[in-house]
Image (cartoon, helix red, strand yellow):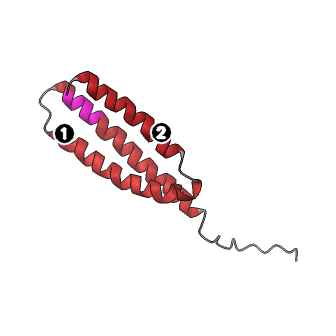
Amino acid sequence: MDGVALLTIFILSIFVGFEVVSKVSTVLHTPLMSGANAIHGVVVMGAIIVAGKATNALELSIALVAVLLGAINLVGGFVVTDRMLEMFKPKKPTGKEGGAA
């Protein structure tokens, strides 16, 4: 494929991704976020493999940036998912009673 075709596919995938993600209801956000985190783990592994097979400095730097950004996205996704799931856990008693003695 030539560069114009690849660029066209990339731009179209951005529009499709935006439309798909913007239509997700808030109830489904947490399960989808967990699934996306698993996919990002695969993306990070792929970026590590590409970094290991890099033949010049440009390929290596792009691959390392991909590993870094993928890892940030992976960890951030798990943090957000954990915080969202905390909302559904029952609150622990604080030990203080509401009445004056």
In this rendering, the count of numbered labels is 2
> Residue 31 placed where, x, y %?
47, 60
Per the model, the C-alpha gap separating discs 2 and 1 is 27 Å
Q: Secondary structure at mark 2?
A: helix
Residue at position x 65%, y 70% from top? 91
> Residue 29 placed where, x, y %?
52, 55
> Residue 4 placed where, x, y %?
28, 22
Q: Is residue 20 left or right of residue 26?
A: left
Residue at position x 43%, y 39% from top? 16
Instruction: Depth check: give the residue in front, 78 or 18.
Output: 18
Q: Quadrant of residue 101?
A: bottom right
Q: Main secondary structure of the magenta part?
A: helix
Q: Is residue 77 left or right of residue 97?
A: left
Tag 1: residue type? Val
State which region is magenta: 59-65
Q: Residues within 10 Å of mark 1 (few under 14, many from 20)?
A: some
Question: In which quadrant is the N terminus drawn?
Answer: top left
> Residue 62 placed where, x, y %?
26, 30
Tag 2: residue type? Phe
**In the rendered view, would you say 86 is above or below 58?**
below
Residue at position x 38%, y 29% from top? 11
Q: Quadrant of residue 46?
A: top left
Q: Secondary structure at mark 1?
A: helix
- Residue 56 is one of the magenta-drawn residues: no
Q: Are marks 2 and 1 in contact (CB under 8 Å)?
A: no
Q: Which mark is residue 50?
A: 1
N-term mark: 2 or 1? 2
Q: Quadrant of residue 86?
A: bottom right
Instruction: Depth check: give the residue in front, 92 or 28.
Output: 28
Q: Which mark is residue 1?
A: none
Residue at position x 14%, y 26% from top? 56
Q: Which mark is residue 18?
A: 2
